[in-house]
Image (cartoon, grey):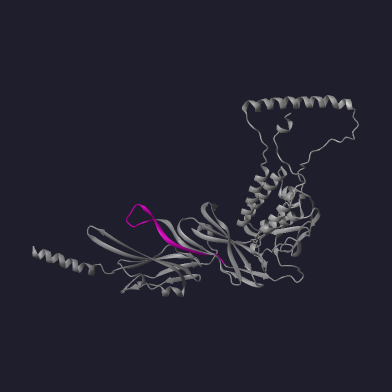
Amino acid sequence: MVMRLLLSIALLIIAPSVMALTKIEASIEKNPVIEGEYFVLNVTADDDLNAGALDTSELLNDFVVGRTSVGRSTQMINFKTSKETRWQVLISPKKTGQLTIPAFTIDGISSSPILVEVAPKGSQPQASQDLYIEVSTNVDEAYVGQLINYKVKLYLAVELQRGVLSAPEVKGATIKQIGEDIDGTEIVNGRRFRVIERNYGIVAGLPGEIIINGATFSGDVLIETQRRGSMFSFNESIPMQTEADRKVMQIHGYPPSYQGEWLVSDLVTLREVWPDEQSTFEAGSPITRTISLIAMNVDENGLPEIKMPNVKGLKIYPEKPLRQSGIRDGQVLSQYSLTAAIVPTVPGTYTLPEIKVPWWNAQRKQQEYAILPAKTITVVAGQMADNTLTVASAEHPQSAASYWPWLTAIFATLWLITLVLWRQASSKKQTITTVTEQPTNLTSDLSAIKKACDSNDVSVIINALQRYFSNQLDSPVSLAQISQLTPALQQAIAQIQSAKYSQQTATIDTQQLLAAIKDYQPKSQKVSRSTIAPLNP
């Protein structure tokens, strides 16, 4: 019994030495391969080894070495334990012909060398590959500042597990992605591919020759494999990498004949948004105008700024410009939009000057202009509500006999109404007194204006002003109508509009506004009295 126990302990002590490294195998996924194409080199050792145990430096003579991944596994079958370390190395041949993958040696154990046949580029159609990249540009040559649309299409005939699509590299130019990725499918020579499309914008800053080093993809894909000794297939994750061909382009400088701020494009246009195509407006009422500069195959930041010209009698309050770009029908469209509030202060006829933007037509190789024609508008005074009673003119010749029947009927009706109201008042024993509510309402509205000025809330001030003067004039009025009452109110209203539409924060002069309100005296004061008292006999 004791001997058996000692024997078991001895076996446990000896076991690690039994599992020492005994075999190294190297294999590749395909043969022959294409020059510049990445493929996977698998190196397997039958022991648990450190990731740095494999030295791949000898591959650098004939191959480009990419990403290396390491995996380990342990199996126990019938109390027999086996371990494995596996390296997956992405390599790409530097030249054509017959190349040799050298033997790898670890702890005195070596793998066998592998002979690889390398065919020249283009000898194998891309459609027969499981992973490849196609790139294209919208032009073969460009000008300084012109946007080059670099389109990348990644073709996948295998299931993608994870991956990174990297942008091309260009010296002397700026690169940025335009829009979002488009994920779809295509049938190429009868094979269905998943296609991921991405657009980059390249803008060269100096004339001369530029080299666009192609976009690259690096990731892991799932392929179906069959293990030795098994009748079933399994999905195995393997690394893959591919790179697009590089492209050389010629960049031209500014044409000597060009005049104005430089803008190169295939098509440029100016558009305008005007409220309901109106041409007549009221003084004091803001007009919203939006001007858009739209250009094809231009970077949004390369569009020039637009300034709305000043016109005497019109105050212009521009907002912050908006720049944006996107892809439409395979073309890059960029837009610069400027919105402004135009406030006419004096009635009259005004002409908004034309806006002209020079640009260079890259297709016709000549200078052209995008023009927004001049626009003429008419400004009229604000229409105040007529609060006075209209009296029929006595100059119209009518016979006295024709008036008396109507007057008699009117007085009889009024007498009957008075009698009925008097009896109702007497039965309820109520005393009807004269009530004047207008001063109380005006005082409350004036306090609301003062409170809004203290908070510097322009919108609340405008609402309180309209409520105050509507009560005083006994009719709804607009801000433009209020400004026509007195010069002092016109000046105060102009200050309010400036604070409303200006980009910078402005403070309302409360004292000036309140003084203008208090100085205004309506032409006729209306006091609401009882409708019964004057008619009681």
* Of 434 and 106, the residue lying toward us: 434
Q: Is residue 491 visible?
A: yes
Magenta span of residues: 225-245
Q: How many marks?
A: 0
**Residue at coordinates 22% horizontally, 59% vertically from top-left?**
79
Tell me: residue 74, above or below residue 478: below
Tell me which corner region of the image, top left, top right, bottom left or bottom right, holds residue 51.
Answer: bottom left
**Residue at coordinates 64% horizontally, 32% vertically from top-left?**
431
Tell me which corner region of the image, top left, top right, bottom left or bottom right, holds residue 354.
Answer: bottom right
Specify the quadrant that holds the C terminus: top right
| Most frequent secondary structure within the magenta stretch | strand
Q: Position of residue 511 (x, y in %)?
A: 67, 58
* Of 420 and 512, the residue lying toward us: 420
Q: Position of residue 364 (x, y in %)?
A: 74, 62
**Relative to 59, is 457 on the left or the right?**
right
* Of 158 and 330, the residue lying toward us: 330
Q: Is residue 287 visible?
A: no
Specify the quadrant that holds the N terminus: bottom left
* Of 517 and 308, the residue lying toward us: 517
Please tell me whether residue 3 belongs to the stretch shown in magenta.
no
Residue, far left: 1
Tell me which corner region of the image, top left, top right, bottom left or bottom right, holds residue 176.
Answer: bottom right
Q: Position of residue 444 (x, y in %)?
A: 63, 48
Q: Position of residue 385 (x, y in %)?
A: 76, 43
**Relative to 478, is 197 on the left or the right?**
left
